[in-house]
Amino acid sequence: MIIIGNGKSLEGFDFKKIKEETIGLCCAYRYWEKINWFPTYYCCVDHVVIKSHIKAIKNLIINKKCKAFLLSASIIQLWPNIQDYKNVFF
């Protein structure tokens, strides 16, 4: 398993060559959208990021961009129906 951060140094990295399962973090989804690549799992437990990026996080989940999601339970206050998604963990 490879854990991928969201630093600028990853720009230009060929993510599509990765064969292992991956965990992507926080706001890195912005870059993944640009390159049309998504990690196996997405993790964001930062309350502030979840609140300010709720629309994008919803998009990741609804469109099944990743296999599963680990999020702060604080998202439930913003999106109560998230609990209906069986691939979302808190």
Image: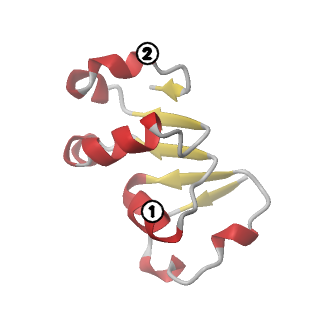
Residue 38 position by quadrant: bottom right
Residue 3, quarter of picture: bottom right
Judging from the image, what secondary structure is the residue with disc 2 in? helix
Report the colour scheme.
Answer: secondary structure
- Name which residue lies at 37% across and 58% down: 27
Residue at 60% x, 53% y: name it: 39
Judge left or right: residue 53 versus residue 13. Answer: left
Residue 42's x, y, as percent?
Answer: 51, 45
Badge 2 crowding class, 10 Å Cα cut-off, few under 14, some 14 to 19, many 20 or more, is: few
* Quadrant placement of the C terminus: top left
Q: Residue at x 35, y 25 (%)?
A: 73
- Number of the label disc, if any, that sits on residue 10: none
Q: Which residue is mark 2?
A: 84
Rendered residue at 55%/26% (across/down) = 87
Q: Is residue 9 above or below residue 28?
A: below
Mark 1 highlights which residue? 33
- Earlier-in-chain disc, 2 versus 1: 1
Instruction: State the image quarter where residue 7 is shown.
Output: bottom left
Relative to 42, residue 38 above or below: below
Between 46 and 37, the residue placed more toward the observer is 37
Residue type marked 2 = Asp
Position of 56 with respect to 11 (left or right) is left
Q: CA distance from mark 2 to mark 1?
A: 25 Å
Amino acid carrying label 1: it is: Glu
Circle 1 residues within 10 Å: few <14, some 14–19, many ≥20: few
**Image position, residue 21 (x, y; %):** 72, 51
Where residue 44 sits: x, y (%)? Answer: 41, 44
Horizontal and vertical percent for residue 32? 49, 63
